[in-house]
Amino acid sequence: MEKGKILLALTGIHPQRWHELLSAEREVVLEPNGANDPSIAYAVVWKQKPNLLKSLPNLRAIFSIGAGVDHIFADPGLPDVPIVKIVADNLTQHMVEYVVWRVLDHHRQASLYRAQQQKKIWHEPPQRAAGDISVGIMGLGSLGSAAASALLSLGFAVNGWSRSERPMKGVSTYAGEAGLIPFLNATDILVVLLPLTPQTQGIVNYGLLKELRRRNGLGGAVLINAGRGRLQKDADILRALDDGTLKEASLDVFEVEPLPKTSPLWSHPKVFVTPHAAATSDPAHLVPIMLRQMAAFERGEKLENLVDRKAGY
Ligand code: NDP
Ligand code: OXD
């Protein structure tokens, strides 16, 4: 197969570095150019403009610069070519750091110490063992399973929930609709690392948060969402925080991004906000993976990390 050209179509992300690195090996056309171009074989995208990809008559594959691909499926004119999602050590490492950071912050009562420091209070609260806390990870895929391993090595009890059965050594695993309530009932700190699909949209709602366990010394259930904002109902999280259903939350993603300045989540004393920054896609690490895959595909090898179009992730 002949060496194909790339269309780079990024919305809300500066394309310069991606362009430089991709151009080292292939010809790259930068959106808004490229529509209808028969010489384009691959599209490297983040939130591509609707119907752009279907205008490319010889498109062979679409590469997402993120692990999530909901931004690709948002296109009503998505052509029927393979979609490749990113799986990279560097991205996984960032997400593992974020999850461990937020779990430890809640587990070690950082908010209490911050409040004490402000008032110059010298008081040592009881310290709980990690093994007495169950961290439940919704989405036991590339990122969720790596986070589970890191939490296990710190001594936490770890639960995992996925669509299909995903046995994992040391982790209590649950699957599908039937496994959801038992999973939540055994979870003190909920970490959400699901993809956004029609099945998962709005799943983190008040009813779900009510099912979390509150029998430990943590002082209440905790939510950490680094998956996608539209998995959650921001208003339900606020309600749960205000009535004690949740003790605290760390949120990296929101129903609307950037989080509107008017959102009460910004200033809520029990919420820790980060701007969709849990694991940033670094072109220096991700572009070589994409270029390697394109070259292998042209030699007749299979593309890796393909999205299951029916499942939506
Ligand atoms: P994977 O595709 O590897 O894993 C997804 C997991 O979710 C799988 O375990 C899958 O189950 C499970 N899942 C999907 N649908 C359902 C469902 N309906 N019910 C139960 N479980 C379900 O994804 P990654 O781990 O690579 O990434 C997860 C998400 O993290 C991305 O889609 C993206 O939205 C988000 N992300 C956020 C970032 C940030 O900076 N905030 C950065 C990177 C990613 P099964 O194992 O059975 O297939
Ligand atoms: C991703 C993201 O999906 O950064 O990789 O959100």
Image: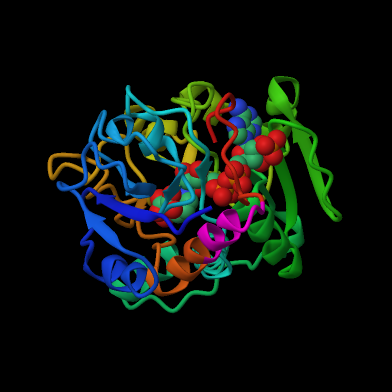
Residue 208 vs residue 24, the one in the foreground: 24
Relative to 123, is 49 on the left or the right?
left
Relative to 182, is 237 on the left or the right?
left
Tell me which corner region of the image, top left, top right, bottom left or bottom right, holds residue 112. bottom left
Residue 91 vs residue 138, the one in the foreground: 91
Residue at image x 46%, y 72%?
285
Q: Position of residue 83 (x, y in %)?
A: 50, 41
Relative to 169, is 159 on the left or the right?
left
Q: Position of residue 212 (x, y in %)?
A: 61, 34
Q: Position of residue 282 (x, y in %)?
A: 39, 68
Q: Position of residue 152 (x, y in %)?
A: 75, 62
Determine if the magenta segment contains residue 305: no
Q: Is residue 313 visible in the rendered structure shown here?
A: yes
Residue at image x 69%, y 21%?
177
Relative to 34, is 86 on the left or the right?
right
Residue at image x 49%, y 28%?
197
Q: Residue furthest front?
A: 2
Determine if the magenta segment contains residue 296: yes
Relative to 167, say whether 150 is above or below: below
Relative to 133, say whether 18 is above or below: below
Residue 259 vs residue 52, the one in the foreground: 52
Residue at image x 63%, y 59%?
147
Relative to 30, say whether 120 is above or below: below
Q: Is residue 188 visible in the rendered structure shown here?
A: no
Relative to 245, say whether 276 is above or below: below
Dominant secondary-structure state across the stretch colored magenta: helix
* Quadrant that contains the C terminus: top right
Q: How many marks?
A: 0
Tell me which corner region of the image, top left, top right, bottom left or bottom right, holds residue 59. top left
Q: What are the residue bounds of the magenta stretch?
A: 292-301
